[in-house]
């Protein structure tokens, strides 16, 4: 009985990995073994950074809100505390958008909350 090598499945597997490795430098897009290693590492980075992206954006929003608060004479922590007390249901993303693109509306919000 002849030896079965499973050529078709192996070829498909290699093509899939090499397709995912498009755009990589040097042999990492050409050579199967190095491409496989790099694709696995890239997928790990992608998984990790999908989680990290949420943290980075939250930090950015807090920095923007804090800057706008200080221009209006209040600290970030006091502002957020007053928002919770007054039951204003705006998340940090919306507050940061107001602070960056509509400073008059943000100023009005600060004045309304701090009364």
Image (cartoon, grey):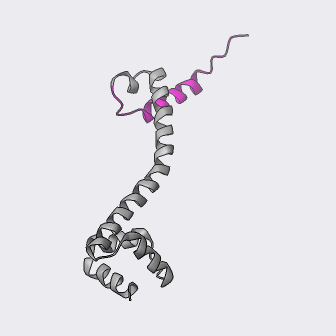
Q: Which residue is drawn at the image coordinates 45% and 26% (left, top)?
A: 35
- Locate residue 83, reporting x and y percent: 45, 79
Magenta stretch encompasses residue 57: no
Q: Nearer the viewer, residue 5 or 50?
A: 50
The residue stretch that appears in magenta: 1-25
Counting from the top left corner in percent of width and height, residue 77 is at: 42, 70
Q: Residue drawn 34% across and 67% down?
A: 66
Q: In front here: 16 or 1? A: 16
- Was residue 6 drawn as part of the magenta stretch in this picture? yes
Q: Can residue 14 be seen? A: yes
Q: Is residue 21 above or below residue 82?
A: above
Q: Quadrant of the N terminus?
A: top right
Between 23 and 74, the one lying in front of the other is 74
Is 65 positioned to the left or the right of 11 in the image? Answer: left
Q: Is residue 64 above or below residue 83?
A: above
Q: Nearer the viewer, residue 23 or 9?
A: 23
* Residue at image point 42% right, 69% down: 92
Residue 25 picture location, percent across and down: 33, 27
| Residue 44, horizontal then vertical, whole percent | 51, 38
Q: Is residue 33 left or right of residue 108?
A: right
Quarter of the rendering containing residue 23: top left
Q: Going 38% across and 89% down the picture, which residue do you hit?
A: 115
């Amino acid at each position: 009985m002849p030896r079965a090598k499973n050529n078709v499945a192996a070829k498909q597997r290699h093509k899939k990995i090499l397709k995912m490795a498009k755009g990589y430098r040097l042999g990492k897009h050409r050579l199967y073994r190095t491409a496989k290693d790099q694709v696995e590492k890239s997928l790990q980075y992608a998984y990790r950074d999908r989680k990290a992206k949420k943290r980075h954006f939250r930090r950015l929003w807090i920095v923007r809100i804090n800057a706008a608060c200080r221009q209006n004479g209040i600290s970030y922590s006091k502002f957020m505390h007053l928002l919770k007390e007054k039951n204003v249901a705006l998340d940090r993303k919306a507050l940061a958008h107001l602070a960056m693109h509509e400073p008059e509306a943000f100023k009005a919000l600060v004045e309304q909350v701090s009364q």
